[in-house]
Image: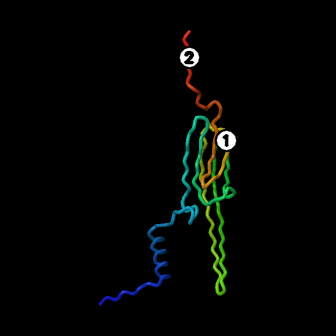
Amino acid sequence: MLMRLSKTPVQSSLSRMMDEFFNGNFPTDLDNNLMATQPSVNVVEKEDSFLLEVAAPGLEKGDFDITIEEDMLTISGHRKEEKEEKESNYTKREFNYSSFSRSFRLPEACNSEEIKANYNNGLLNLTIPKKEEEKKQAARTIEIS
């Protein structure tokens, strides 16, 4: 006769965490485990500019650093979260530090002096204008004389 031992809730939770760790199933939800992966970035070329859309929910405007060095644009984000719960017989403290950094080489067509950024509803938008000489000009007809 085979006897099966049941696990306590703590043993079950620990067992699940160990399975996830050793099987590589790490959480990637940016809201619960911010920056577990790099945020998604869309790059859109418009007639007179480039638009970078960075999906970074859960951050605040002040959590970002945007720098340009030579022709390299770097967007980084960081978040520090501390929680403390006090009950009559215990204290629970949790710390969460997370960060990311993404770099993009800007093409020569960009006017890096005029880049604008805004953050709204979890989306960081950077508008990178093109240099005047690089903007697409409207088609025109050339008359033959």
Q: Which residue is disc 2 drawn over?
A: 142
Residue plotted at (63% across, 74% down): 94
Residue plotted at (49% across, 74% down): 17
Q: Secondary structure at mark 2?
A: loop
Is disc 2 surrounded by few (<14), some (14 to 19) or many (20+) residues within 10 Å? few
Whichever of labels 1 and 2 marks the residue nearer the N terminus, that label is 1
Query: Please, is residue 55 above or below residue 18 in the view?
Result: above
Pointer 1 with pointer 2, Cβ within 8 A: no
Query: Please, is residue 2 above or below residue 30 in the view?
Result: below
Please name which of the two marks, 1 or 2, marks the residue nearer to the observer. Answer: 2
Q: How far across and how far down the image is residue 6, in percent? A: 41, 85
Is residue 20 toward the left or the right of residue 83 in the image? Answer: left
Query: Please, is residue 145 above or below residue 61 in the view?
Result: above
Q: Quadrant of residue 82?
A: bottom right
Amino acid type assigned to the residue bearing label 2 in the image: Ile
Residue plotted at (46% across, 80% down): 12
Q: Residue furthest bottom?
A: 1
Residue plotted at (61% across, 55% down): 121
Is residue 44 toward the left or the right of residue 119 in the image? Answer: left
Q: Please tell me the numbered disc located at residue 70.
A: none
Q: How far across and how far down the image is residue 131, in percent? A: 65, 34
Q: Residue furthest front?
A: 121
Q: Quadrant of residue 61?
A: bottom right
Q: Please tell me the numbered disc located at residue 112.
A: 1
